[in-house]
Image (cartoon, rainbow, N blue to C red):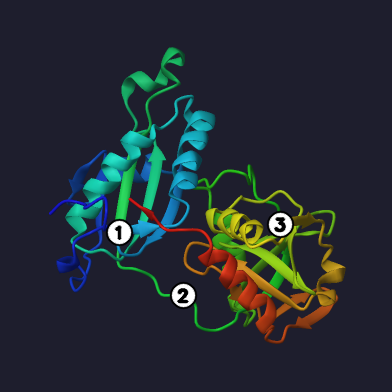
């Protein structure tokens, strides 16, 4: 069955579950070769939740993959190539609702050791698995001073993110929030964060990954007439806000229950006004057919 450009994937696929599969350059993999594990330590990726064969921010995902590949490998990724392998992987997944991760890296080859071949064409690994439901419980965050290397890239160097998230859970919190050496809030382990106050949505001005959902929400807010605000958010001022929200491909706006810093804990109550505003902004950005 192929993709119907007008309606997305065929309705017959809706009731079929997904068995996780991996495809390298459009070829299904039966197992994970050791060389693949070595290669993926230097690379980048993008993740998306596909529903009914559609996703918000498709053009931004494609742009992220192209720009990151140019920076890491000296060669970009055309939208046609990415869409070709993505559509093939979704076709074989036999479902309209899936989680997708597209990873770009370079498999080890003898010729890539020579200086004149240090700009190889990136390899693409597409992982398709069952859809992930949004988080149901507002998380309690523990703040750590931490700055990710090259934070503008969604790179595969995620050791520190996992490390601090684990440290937070060992301390009986749900996840980690980061602040930089200047004491300003930046991002969370796998999320961007924004704050709400008096009908305004504020994004921390810091070195962060520009998440696709964050960019989608910002575009949606502008579409509903709310100006974008990006300002420094010192850790010492987080109690001045009505609410805080985490955003990523799984959770478009996950309300934060509390943030614990070296100075104490800030509790946030439910804020229906800002929650409704963010939901309206997110819905204002249409879904794209893959």
The N terminus appears in which quarter of the rendering? bottom left
Q: Name the foreground residue: 104 vs 225.
A: 225
What residue is disc 1 on?
53
Alpha carbon separation for disc pair 3 and 1: 37 Å
Count of residue discs: 3
Dot 2 falls on a residue whose secondary structure is loop
Q: Could you say where residue 180 lies in the image, as x and y percent from the top left?
A: 77, 55
Mark 3 / mark 1, whichever is N-terminal = 1
Q: Could you say where residue 247 lies in the image, as x and y percent from the top left?
A: 58, 65
Q: Which image quadrant is residue 243 in?
A: bottom right
- The residue mark sitting in front, 3 or 1, is 1
What residue is disc 2 on?
134
Q: Is residue 206 left or right of residue 7?
A: right
What residue is disc 3 on?
146
- For disc 1, the neighbor class at 10 Å (few under 14, some 14 to 19, many from 20) is many
Dot 1 falls on a residue whose secondary structure is loop
Dot 3 falls on a residue whose secondary structure is loop
Mark 3 / mark 2, whichever is N-terminal = 2
């Amino acid at each position: 069955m192929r993709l119907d450009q007008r309606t997305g994937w065929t309705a017959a696929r809706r009731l079929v579950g997904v068995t996780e599969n991996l495809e390298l350059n459009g070829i299904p993999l039966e197992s994970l070769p050791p060389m693949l594990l070595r290669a993926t330590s230097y690379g980048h990726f993008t993740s998306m939740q596909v529903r009914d064969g559609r996703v918000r921010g498709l053009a931004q995902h494609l742009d992220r993959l192209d720009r990151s590949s140019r920076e890491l490998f000296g060669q970009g990724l055309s939208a046609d190539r990415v869409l070709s392998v993505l559509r093939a992987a979704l076709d074989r997944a036999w479902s309209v609702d899936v989680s997708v991760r597209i990873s770009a890296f370079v498999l080890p080859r003898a010729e890539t050791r020579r200086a004149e071949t240090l700009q190889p064409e990136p390899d693409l690994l597409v992982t398709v698995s069952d859809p992930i439901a949004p988080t149901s419980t507002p998380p309690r965050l523990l703040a750590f001073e931490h700055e990710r290397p090259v934070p503008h890239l969604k790179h595969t160097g995620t050791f520190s993110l996992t490390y601090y998230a684990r440290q937070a859970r060992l301390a009986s919190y749900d996840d980690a929030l980061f602040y930089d050496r200047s004491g300003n809030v930046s991002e969370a382990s796998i999320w961007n964060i924004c704050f709400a106050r008096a009908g305004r949505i504020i994004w921390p001005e810091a070195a962060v990954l520009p998440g696709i959902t964050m960019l989608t929400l910002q575009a949606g807010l502008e579409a509903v007439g709310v100006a974008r605000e990006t300002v420094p958010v010192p850790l010492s001022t987080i109690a001045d806000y009505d609410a805080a929200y985490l955003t990523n491909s799984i959770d478009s706006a996950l309300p934060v229950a509390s943030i614990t810093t070296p100075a104490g804990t800030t509790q946030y109550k439910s804020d229906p006004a800002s929650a409704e505003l963010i939901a309206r902004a997110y819905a204002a950005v249409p879904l794209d057919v893959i």
